[in-house]
Image: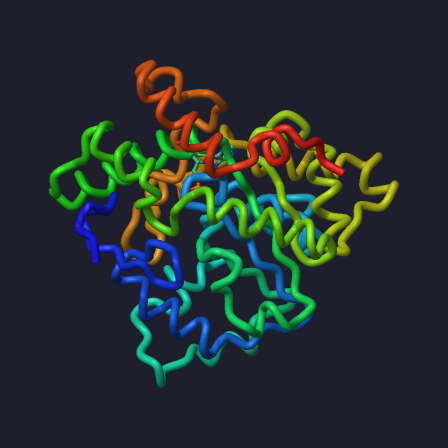
Amino acid sequence: PKEKGWVSQYMYLYQQFWCPSPLIQPTITFQKYFQAKHNDIVIASLPKAGTTWLKALAFAVVKRSHSIPTSQNDPHPLLNSNPHTLVPFFELDIYANKTNNVIPNYLSTLPEPRMFGTHIPFPSLSHSIHNSDCKIIYICRNPLDTFISHWHFSNNILSSQSLPTLTLEEAFEGYCEGMHPFGPFWSHILSYWNASRDKPSKVLFLKYEEVKANTNSELKRMAQFLDYPFTPEEESGGVIDTIIELCSFKKMKELEINKSGKFANKIENKHFFRKGENGDWVNYFSPSMIEKLSKVIEEKLDMESIFLASSP
Ligand code: A3P
């Protein structure tokens, strides 16, 4: 166990990733008991890589038949529920606070396709996920922006609990050593990157920056991958634009549920929406921090192939 976690709690090195202590039991229970269905959809990511956005986009794509067009009487679920409620996390929500013998029975009766989220690295997902035909979409984000986003997020949570916050330098040391929730970041990213190369029909690897730059084409790619492609009529009828607008940072941040609601009865939804921009790290990193993290990235990650590779 190490004490230097980002959320002022112990983290344990479990199956080669840093797992915050309250999430160890839920992770083990998930690994042991989760039964995947062939049409399940799993949204995977490191914290602060764009999970909320990807959940919203994937949900809007897959469940589009019952909710478009939106109207006052039949509001889209994303207008009154946070994406983390619609697409719950295995370890933070479904299996949280459950002992080994209390398995959430409702899982088998959820409407299909079921959609879940996780921050657990690829090798540690349940065997059932590995062995079924269910699909995984991973979102990766530039590690510098992910770091800054996480620093703000954890300090917001810490101050809301009247706990001491972390300086940028303290958080940065842990990050460069790989010691942050579900880290090291390089192993996490590589685990899904390699899986997407080995099994392209099972794992789709997306990048936050690309989804931002080409939302329309990335959304189509996602829909195709999930076997929910847009028809020509939908494309010409503006369905894609409706989804993009519905899930946009500006729209989601302004929704009442995301301003005042709470996720899993703990974390205020507003903390999931900060700036939603690329490159905010330039406002925080000193030259020596840039040098240090760039070196870590260069040594541990093949940036060329991951961040510069164009989408297939
Ligand atoms: P910033 O802190 O850089 O603004 P996660 O969803 O994985 O927790 O990641 C949160 C990050 O995604 C935050 O980044 C947040 O502002 C951004 N984000 C949330 N919703 C978004 C959306 N609809 N579009 C783009 N970015 C979004």
Between 161 and 290, the one lying in front of the other is 290
What colour scheme has been applied to the protein in the rendered image? Answer: rainbow
Locate residue 97 relative to residue 53 in the image: left or right: left
Q: Residue at x 55, y 53 (%)?
A: 43
- The quarter of the rendered structure image containing the N terminus is bottom left
Residue at x 24%, y 42% (from the top left corner): 157
Which percent across, then down, holds residue 135? 65, 60
Is residue 85 something that shows in the picture?
no
| Residue most extreme to the front | 299
Q: Is residue 307 left or right of residue 14?
A: right
Q: Quadrant of ligand 1?
A: top left
| Residue found at the very far right of the displayed protein | 232
What percent of the width, then of the height, locates residue 113?
A: 65, 65
Q: How many marks?
A: 0
Q: Furthest-bottom residue in view?
A: 101
Q: Residue at x 86, y 42 (%)?
A: 233
Q: Position of residue 193 (x, y in %)?
A: 60, 47
Asked if residue 19 is positioned above or below residue 28 in the image, the reply reads above
**Viewed as shown, does residue 204 lie left or right of 294?**
right
Q: Can residue 88 be seen? A: yes
Q: Is residue 266 above or below residue 242?
A: below
| Position of the C terminus by quadrant | top right
Pinpoint residue 114: horizontal percent, then vertical percent: 59, 65
Q: Nearer the viewer, residue 168 or 304?
A: 304
